[in-house]
Structures are given as C-alpha cells and as structure tokens.
C-alpha cells in the first residue's frame, strides 16, 4: 500500500497519508498555491508560508505545516521537498522521494519561463510526473515573456499619450501583482479595481513589495494604468472616460475565448506553461510515466504518447494505483 498513487477527487499517496490539492476537505493535504480552486479547509495543510499568507481567512485550513522551498520533510517511507513552481508567489511543486529510490513530482500550476531576469523554474527528476496541462494543445505557444511585457508597456504608453486610460484585464490574485512588477521599470503608476486591491495588499504583506498604486474609488485616474479582473467592467465604465482594454492571459491564443472577454487587445503573458514548456517539464523531469490534470488533459497525454512517453489523463481514471 505504501507504493500507491490514487485518484479520487484529487491525487493521493495513500501509503504516506498525503493528498495533493484535493477538491474535498482531507485530514492532511498539500496546497500547491493560493488560488481558490486549490485552497480548502483541510484539517492540516502542507504549504509554503507565502501560500498561507495569500489564502483569504474564510478559506484557510484549520491547521498547517509550513515548509519553505528546498527544506526536506519526512513523510511515511520517504521525504517531501517543495520547489518553486513559478506560477505565483508561494506556488510550489511537490517532490516525493521514496526510501527505495523511486520518486514522484506533482507540479501544481507551473510556469517555466519568467520575465524580469528571474531564472527559469527548476524541475526535479522523478520517475512519475503528475503535470497540470491547462494549455496542453499545440496552438498555445506564447511569446517570450520580456518581449510581451515590452509590448504591453508600449500599448499603455500610447494610450496614455492619447489621453485614453489603459485597462489591463488580469486575474486579481497573482497575475495583477506580477504584471505590476513586470511593468514597474517603465515608471507607470497604477490604479486597481476594488477586487484586485486586497490581493495586492496581501502580496505585499507576504513579502513581495509592489510599485505604488491607488484603489479605484469612482473618480477618474488620469495618467494611471488601471488593472481590473476580466469579468464585470461596470465600475470601469462608470468612472473612466475614454479607455481601452487589453486581456493579459494565455487564452489570448484562443480567438474564441479572447472574444468572450470583449477586450480591445490581447497579450499572451501567462502564469502557466504553454504547450512547448509542458513538453520541457516532461523532458527535464526524466519521468517515464506521466499523468495529466487540469485543462486539455486528454489532448496533452495523446501528444506525449505520440512522442513515445507513457502518459494518461488522470481524471479519466476512477482509481489509479501505480508503483512508487
Ligand atoms: Zn493557479
């Protein structure tokens, strides 16, 4: 039993009493990062200090075991080590090394290529890889992050020069703050829609100071770059005069999806891996068994099989037990 991985509303290593981002409340579970689709009120959670700081009070686990990157922790017949996943502040991959030499890597949401001269995300070696495959179709190929940031900065500058307010549509937690940091060298001042403001405060409190910003309060904000979530633009319509919107998301690569948001422009800056980066994660891990979770799981597993990698979409397996 100690060598099993099981899928049941989440991945578990039953022999080691460890759940990985389970969708239902468990007694001991790893929370890979603070996005609400992963945070549950588990009895005890394993997470990084930054992830704990970014989880809103109402969603916090009842107890926790904080673990920094690279600090090994004994669990069952092996050890657990967390590594940065490059997805947002505090996001972590979980590496489980069994005492018999076998190993498993669970990526959580992961991003390899970083802007701002931040080194690429390190991928530990493992026999078994459980990989998020949000953008697991080949048409999701994103531009170089630094060039995209430069294009966003130029788009904002042109709007401001024409007395038009640039509005960047970004998810409130993670994307908003990372975009602010990426644009900081260009000297912009920011105004955040009210849903983004608490996340920005938490980000700064969790150890990543942000460039100066004010909260949108119904008054015009001339000369500032506005950041707002992609859905619900009522407040923007109410208080901004002339404005233009740009969707900042990997979904920019999907014309139909981009149209849904009704943005004037799109930029493919993502906090997830694109198709090629997902392939890179698989290669760097050296894994000979890959399980995909989230997004285009079937498509990406099929693409891996075509390249000779043993891969399966995990959601389709009601119960999965494999050697670890
Ligand atoms: Zn996420």
Image (cartoon, grey):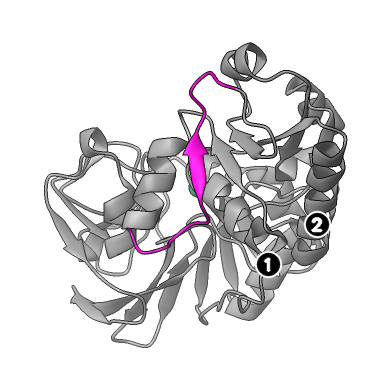
In primary-sequence order, the first of circles 1 and 2 is 1
> Which of 169/91 is in front?
169
Using the rendered view, name the quadrant where residue 198 is placed. Answer: top left
Q: How many marks?
A: 2
Label 1 Cα crowd, 10 Å radius (few <14 / some 14-19 / many 20+): some
Q: Which residue is mark 2?
A: 148
Residue 37 in picture, x, y percent from top left: 42, 38
Element at label 1: loop
Whether tag 1 and tag 2 are in contact, CB under 8 A, the answer is yes
Residue 262's place in the image compared with 266, above or below, is above
* Cα distance between the residues tagged 1 and 2: 9 Å
**Quadrant in which the C terminus appears:** bottom left
Using the rendered view, name the quadrant where residue 274 is placed. Answer: bottom right
Label 2 Cα crowd, 10 Å radius (few <14 / some 14-19 / many 20+): some
Residue 253 in sight: no
Residue 259's place in the image compared with 17, above or below, is above
**Stretch in magenta:** 206-219
- Report whether 162 appears left or right of 58: right
> Which of 187/119 is in front?
187
Residue 306 in sight: yes
- Report whether 103 appears left or right of 180: left
Residue 126 in picture, x, y percent from top left: 50, 78
> Which of 177/121 is in front?
177
Residue at 61% across / 62% down in the picture? Answer: 111
Q: Which residue is mark 1?
A: 115
Q: Is residue 212 magenta?
A: yes
Element at label 2: helix
């Amino acid at each position: 039993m100690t060598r099993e991985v099981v899928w049941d509303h989440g991945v578990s290593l039953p022999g080691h009493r460890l759940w990985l981002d389970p969708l239902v409340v468990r007694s001991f579970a790893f929370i890979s990062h603070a996005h609400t689709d992963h945070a549950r009120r588990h009895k005890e959670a394993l997470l990084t200090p930054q992830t704990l700081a970014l989880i809103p009070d109402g969603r916090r686990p009842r107890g926790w075991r904080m673990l920094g990157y690279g600090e090994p922790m004994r669990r069952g017949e092996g050890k657990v080590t967390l590594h940065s996943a490059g997805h947002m502040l505090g996001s972590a991959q979980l590496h489980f090394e069994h005492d018999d030499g076998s190993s498993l890597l669970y990526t959580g949401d992961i991003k390899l290529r970083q802007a701002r001269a931040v080194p690429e995300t390190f991928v530990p070696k493992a026999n078994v890889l459980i990989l998020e495959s949000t953008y697991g179709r080949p048409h999701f190929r994103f531009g170089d992050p630094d060039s995209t940031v430069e294009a966003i900065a130029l788009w904002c500058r042109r709007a401001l020069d024409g007395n038009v307010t640039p509005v960047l549509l970004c998810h409130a937690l993670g994307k908003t703050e990372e975009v602010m940091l990426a644009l900081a060298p260009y000297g912009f001042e920011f105004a955040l829609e009210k849903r983004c403001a608490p996340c920005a405060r938490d980000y700064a409190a969790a150890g990543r100071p942000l460039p100066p910003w004010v909260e949108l309060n119904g008054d015009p904000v001339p000369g500032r770059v506005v950041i707002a979530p992609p859905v619900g633009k009522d407040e923007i319509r109410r208080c901004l005069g002339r404005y233009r919107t740009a969707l900042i998301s990997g979904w920019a690569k999907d014309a139909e999806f981009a149209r849904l948001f009704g943005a004037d422009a799109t930029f493919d800056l993502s906090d997830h891996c694109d198709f090629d980066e997902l392939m890179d994660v698989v290669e760097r891990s050296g894994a000979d068994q890959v399980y995909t979770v989230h997004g285009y799981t079937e498509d990406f597993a099929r693409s891996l099989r075509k390249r000779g990698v043993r891969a399966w979409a995990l959601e389709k397996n009601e119960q999965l037990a494999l050697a670890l």
